[in-house]
């Protein structure tokens, strides 16, 4: 017997991959509550709308009445909904506080009101809560040192989720994934931006010296780990979900240039992101102890995953072209680069 799971933010990148897997590999019934922000794309799950175990609700997690309706009869919550792009949080943090902090609070409150009915509340946090880790790896008890408004809002939400376990006994489990890549990622994020810009013959803007290190995980591995944490995680515990690949941005660019046969001239160095975290690295041993084994994560499979990802975007122009052509996308880029040019001139 499956559970009835409320997924928030299921039209986004990781949420839509999570739902696809859940409908294919579990017996769970899924209710997807998503506000359809610029990042929430109905196309991501359009083919699943007729599925008998899937229901879509358009709505905002920061509205208590919407959340009350959405949580009816639910046994578990998988909370993905968030404003997620660090550069946008630097330009305008307000939406990040509203959705990531207040929205999370509304969900936790409704779950508390339904004490006993909600058996698991999976809160999706991020490795960015730890801030930059110059050496070694962050374990789950490492202090929080968020730097961007995005990371600070996610740190606040993470603390709130823990507080609801400690204070009210809500069966909260927390996942802190590292940088995901794969299909259905909105093309403002580094990897899909790189692939789609190159597919259009445009350069990829590499921030600063490109020496920042990210811990990459294929989204298919991540959603398997999240499902395991949802089912088997100990209430009150947090689990890092890190890929085994640590890579500098400029090395990722090099790998992708090889995969796609792209000349150096299509990489443009641009001024750095303000407060850009130098390195993230997660210690994911707690997840391994829970029984997680990566299917495609070891370094040998990383190149294959990158090739699959490039091929997915290359064959799905009809998915990403309208997103990149939309006024939302171009307005964001105008603002982002006007800001960067100002900062560079001031230095
Ligand atoms: P995304 O930006 O692709 O999707 C976010 C989704 O949330 C969208 O469908 C959007 O419409 C929805 N949403 C936003 N505000 C909402 C609101 N107020 N009410 C209802 N729905 C709303 O995000 P993603 O990259 O899939 O990330 C999902 C979660 O995982 C986030 O919590 C993010 O912080 C976390 N995370 C992401 C990564 C990554 O590499 N992408 C890594 C670690 C953690
Ligand atoms: O670490 C987990 C986080 O990963 C998630 O919590 C966030 O929601 C998600 O957006 C992602 O944040 P990053 O800032 O790491 O991802 P992004 O794809 O924006 O950038 C990856 C790296 O590439 C980062 O060091 C900045 C750099 N970059 C990014 C863009 C968009 C560039 O050099 N050029 C770019 O144009």
Image (cartoon, rainbow, N blue to C red):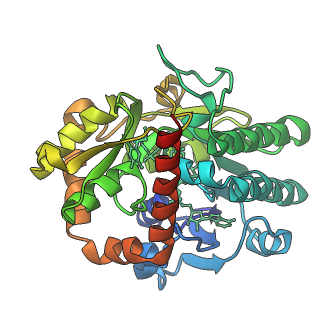
265 vs 16: above or below: above
Q: In this view, does 93 lie to the left or right of 199?
A: right
Q: Residue furthest front?
A: 345
In the foreground, 194 or 177: 194
Instruction: Tell me where residue 183 sits by quadrant.
Output: bottom left
Residue 46 image offset from top left, x and y in percent? 44, 80
Answer yes or no: is residue 4 visible. Answer: no
In the foreground, 25 or 35: 35
Residue 143 image offset from top left, x and y in percent? 68, 21
329 vs 243: above or below: below
Q: In which quarter of the image is the N terminus?
A: bottom right
Q: Is residue 344 left or right of residue 317?
A: right
Residue 140 image offset from top left, x and y in percent? 62, 25
Instruction: Tell me where residue 162 sits by quadrant.
Output: top right
Q: Residue furthest top?
A: 135
Q: In which quarter of the image is ligand 1?
A: bottom right
Residue 196 image offset from top left, x and y in percent? 27, 62
Q: Which residue lies furthest to the bottom in this view?
A: 50
> Residue visible at 53% across and 39% down?
346
> Residue visible at 20% across and 63% down?
199
């Amino acid at each position: 017997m499956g559970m009835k799971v409320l997924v928030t933010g299921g039209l986004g990148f990781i949420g839509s991959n999570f739902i696809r897997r859940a409908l294919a590999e579990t017996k769970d019934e899924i209710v997807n509550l998503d506000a359809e922000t610029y990042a929430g794309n109905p196309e991501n799950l359009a083919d699943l709308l007729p599925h008998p175990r899937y229901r879509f609700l358009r709505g905002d997690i920061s509205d208590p009445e919407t959340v009350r309706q959405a949580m009816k009869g639910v046994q578990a919550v998988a909370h993905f909904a968030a404003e997620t792009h660090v550069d946008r949080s630097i330009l305008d943090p307000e939406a990040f506080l509203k959705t990531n902090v207040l929205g999370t609070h509304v969900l936790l409150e409704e779950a508390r009101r339904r004490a006993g009915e909600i058996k698991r509340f999976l809160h999706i946090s991020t490795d960015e809560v730890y801030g930059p880790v110059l050496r070694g790896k962050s374990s789950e008890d490492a202090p929080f040192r968020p730097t961007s408004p995005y990371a600070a809002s996610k740190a606040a939400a993470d603390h709130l989720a823990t507080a609801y376990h400690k204070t009210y006994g809500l069966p909260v489990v927390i996942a802190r994934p590292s940088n995901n890549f794969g299909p259905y990622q909105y093309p403002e994020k580094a990897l899909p931006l790189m692939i789609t810009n190159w597919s259009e013959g445009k350069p990829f803007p590499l921030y600063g010296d490109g020496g920042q290190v990210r811990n990459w995980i294929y989204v298919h591995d991540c959603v398997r780990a999240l499902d395991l944490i949802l089912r088997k995680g100990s209430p009150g515990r947090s689990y890092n979900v890190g890929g085994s690949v640590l890579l500098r941005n400029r090395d990722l660019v090099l790998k992708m240039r090889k995969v796609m046969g792209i000349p150096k001239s299509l990489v443009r160095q641009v001024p750095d992101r303000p407060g850009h975290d130098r390195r993230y690295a997660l210690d994911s041993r707690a997840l391994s102890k829970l029984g997680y084994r990566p299917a495609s994560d070891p370094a040998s499979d990383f190149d294959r995953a990158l090739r699959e990802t490039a091929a997915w975007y290359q064959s799905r122009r009809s998915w990403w072209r309208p997103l990149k052509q939309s006024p939302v996308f171009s307005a964001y880029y105008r603002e982002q680069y006007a800001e960067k040019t100002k900062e560079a001139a001031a230095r």
